[in-house]
Amino acid sequence: MARIPLLLAAWAALASLFAADPAAAQDKPPLTVGAIYVGSVNDYGYNRAMKDGLEEMKKNIPGLKLIEAENVPETAESERIMEGMIQQGAKLIFATSFGHQQFAFNLAKAHPDVVFEHAGGWMQAPNFGNFFGATQTAWYAMGVAAGKMTKSNTLGFVVGVPIGYAIGNVNAFEMGARSVNPKAETRVVVTGGWADKAKEAAAANALIDQAADVVTMHVDSPATIIQIAESRGAYSIGFQSIEARALAPKGWITGLGFTWGPFMTATANAVIAGTFKPAMVRLGLGQGMMAVAPFGPAVPADVQALVTAAADKIGKGFTPFTGPVADNTGVVRIKDGETWYGDKMGNFDWYVEGVIGKAK
Amino acid sequence: MNAALIAGVIASSILSGTSLLYATLGELVGERAGIVNLGLEGIMLIGAATGFAVAALTGDPYVGLAAAALAGGAVNLIFAYLVVGCRANQLATGLCLMFFGLGLSALVGRPFVGALITGLPRMHLPGVGGAGARLLSYDMLVYLAAPAALFIWWLLFRTRWGLVVRAVGESPAVVYAAGRRPAFVQYQALALAGLLGGVGGAHLSLALTLTWAEGMTAGRGFIAIALVIFARWNPLWAIAGALLFGGAEALQLQLQAAGADVSPFVMNMIPYLLTFLVLILWGWNRQSAAPAALGRTHFGVE
Amino acid sequence: MPRSAATLCLESALGAASRAALVTLVALGAFAALLTAAGKDPLKAYVDTIAYVFGNPYGFSELLVRMIPLLLTAVAVALPSRIGLINVGGEGQLYMGAWLTTAGALSLSDQPAYVLLPVLTLLGFVGGGLWALIAGVLRALRLVNETISTLLLNYVAPMIVGFFIFGPWRSPESASYPQSPAFVDAARLPSFFHTRVNAGLFYAFVCLLLYWLLMTRTRWGLEMRAIGGNPEAARQLGVPVFRIILIVMFLAGGVAGLAGMVEVTAIQGRLVSELSPGYGFIGFLVAWLAGTSAVGIVVMAFLFAVISSVGDILQITQGLPFAVVNILMAVILFIVLARRSVGSAAR
């Protein structure tokens, strides 16, 4: 009978002993930044690009403290993790994967003094901004590279989740290939998830079985697909991080990568200065958020020149999505005189002529 | 339907099914000895992570493979100690093992995420050239998979050891009365099961994807458990089952590459629905093929 | 001096808690050794966790948030276990409960909350219940063992959910990400005190209470315990075993389905492809550890929620993947499993 108050007292004492946070007696950093990644930063892909950007930001702002968490799933768990970072003093949170949006937004409402930057979404609030690269037009340059390098005229594209933006990437890719090689076709395989390695391997193999000799992808990490391509003697074009070229010493053509550093540095400085304004930032090639990766050893100089020229054109505002553009069943989707850009990139539910696959 | 598609599907099924087959064989041996291991998923993950880590450290995928097998066997012996030695509830212990494997593999694999390894090399069959060469070049584990099934069949049905194992699975009391120690046999069976499960996991990381990611087995361990039932605890039928499941996953991706329109979700459901169908049909035939003492623990005086 | 029932309850709860604490301490020691070997600081992690969970209102509230699905899935396992059935299908039942809830939320979005929420609760229950009923029917007809059928159904359920959120229920506003449209406010289960602790806690305790009442205070409870002990004898005595198996599986699945309903209406606010980090399996372990006693379920769910918080801390402050905390959970269970069976009868 007397055990009860004793046990309760013991629990209470234990709790009170640790209730106070030990004060940090070091110098206060100018800013504490929290970042959550959906996967591992060693993925040669999406997360690596985010990490590289954050590291650049950290280098540019001396004393900045960066708290990171990898493998944060796109579920309610992420809210917990971000809240934990806020409690550790973070005043700027980068939620780097699409599925983190709702949870970051919930926290933005609860913490008006913390700034949130989310990658790839659309929500806005006074302390919640959105950023991403405008990838679709940039893929045109990749298509140019692929169209020139392919000998079988079959290109392979592995897509994780068939969202509008990914389909737009495929379309621009095919259009770029067609612009230098009218016989080029792109076969698409959808794995159903952004990071299912076993399916990515099977998809890459399937595409190569169907005679694709240039393989590219829109998944979180290009590693598996590039390695499979390399092991089977196919060329590869990377995406997400330009570091992926390390995976294919022989077959690497080029790739697209995100360069988040300048944007992240600018955001952090704005938060420090108190001048942060939320915005929907979508920047493309030539505007600081995206870059074309160095070329691999197999790419001849004339192809390099073509690709660089295409990239320049895109940087100056060129887009392939100017009408008339027909889909792969012959129906005209972008009318003469019309141009698709910006938000419409999320509306793709059709493939252009030359792409073998069904978008819906 | 072109020849490339059919060939691709077959090749993909074989590749996909290999890790399943090893894991299924492992579970089968354990279940023949009367032990259900729901933690096979954990064993496979440990095999995948250990194999990848050691291959990255030593640069030799074969050393990695050996390490994966040993790790799987060692961890399964922990499981064996609990269910055989301590007579713990097999299902709870198995699930516990699954979580353990999830965590341990994440810890072991973490420093190696993104590491580049030389995977198990693909070997061409001598004398086959051209298109055949492209399709008939697999790694060693694939070539050894069906022979492994045959070996396990021979082990279980043509050797004395196998006879004792099966007897333990049917009636441990009889074995004990005959002067053998069922517990010792079960330890041996589970060690072998762990070895095979580790190899199954290693195939995923060392040959199929050449990467490590947390939880990459994605439920294959549980599929293997279903396959054991599908195969009616016979290693030869396990080959067919592994091909079927491997095939379903591969088929929808290959169909996509060939331009056909299939819903990946519907395709992925098919192997499970087929297993259900098979189970119901087997169940209709009242005579159960399962080892009689499966899931129960033995209580002789030891 | 005779003790009141309340005192006994409290004592047994605290006694169970102390036993759990002892086992946990041993496991924490083993885990600390592992963490040290991995180059991390276990003591700091533990201290941080206690500060987070007990000294921090948010941390404590998240503890409760974690407990809600665990309480429900544990009951979903405990109930059938009383008649000797093993339900490892909590995951699938949770998904199907969420699925049917979404169907209701999307089609009845113009209803007011006091109509919509009870309907959604019912749908969540029915969704999970029907899913478990499949396994129940197969078992009652003696065609397929329920362990394997519930296990297999765990895989089919997320595929059904995936099919719908990629297809008919794909949210047009987030065409860039497969998920259902957000639920209207009337379809959201309310939360309290600016935390994520939600009415699901109420559901969980109601289910626990009903479970306890059913097993200890009703005729059906006695019948069920008879079946659990000896199905053949029960059948001979006229107990309608077939019907009871169906009803029990339906109820169990329904409770797990409620966990799914809570997840989509309170936490997520929509149907997404990743709803559960293994709640169904952890619920199985909770129920098993608790020995199917209602009080034990609360204690064990609390314990597992605290362990999960260790995982959070490890991830935020020490850079370890959350999955590592599964080792701690497993080690605790290993110890219990090794101790439990000494001198105890077969299960």
Image (cartoon, rainbow, N blue to C red):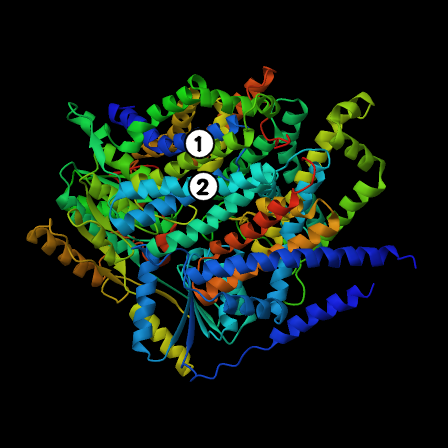
Q: Is residue C176 left or right of residue C132?
A: left
Relative vertical location of residue A40 with respect to residue B122 in this rendering, above or below: below
Residue B174, horizontal then vertical, whole percent: 60, 21
Residue located at (48% from left, 20% from top): B163
Residue located at (43% from left, 29% from top): B25
> In this orientation, does residue B9 appear?
no
Q: Is residue A28 left or right of residue B130?
A: right
Residue C6, horizontal then vertical, whole percent: 84, 57
Q: Residue furthest right?
A: C1
Chain for mark 1? B
Secondary structure at numbered mark 2: helix
Relative vertical location of residue B100 with respect to residue B135 in this rendering, above or below: below
Number of numbered discs: 2
Q: Are marks 1 and 2 in contact (CB under 8 Å)?
A: yes
Q: State which quarter of the image contains the N terminus of chain C.
A: bottom right
Relative vertical location of residue A200 with respect to residue B267 in this rendering, above or below: below
Label 1, on which residue?
B26
Chain for mark 2? B
> In this orientation, does residue C111 appear?
yes
Answer few, some or many: residues within 10 Å of disc 1's Cα (few below 14, many 20 plus, some between 14 and 19).
many
Alpha-carbon span between mark 1 and mark 2: 10 Å
* Amino acid on which disc 2 is placed: Ile
Q: Is residue A173 left or right of residue A189?
A: left
Which quadrant of the view contains residue A97? bottom left
Q: Is residue B168 left or right of residue A222?
A: right
Label 2, on which residue?
B43
Marks 1 and 2 belong to one chain: yes
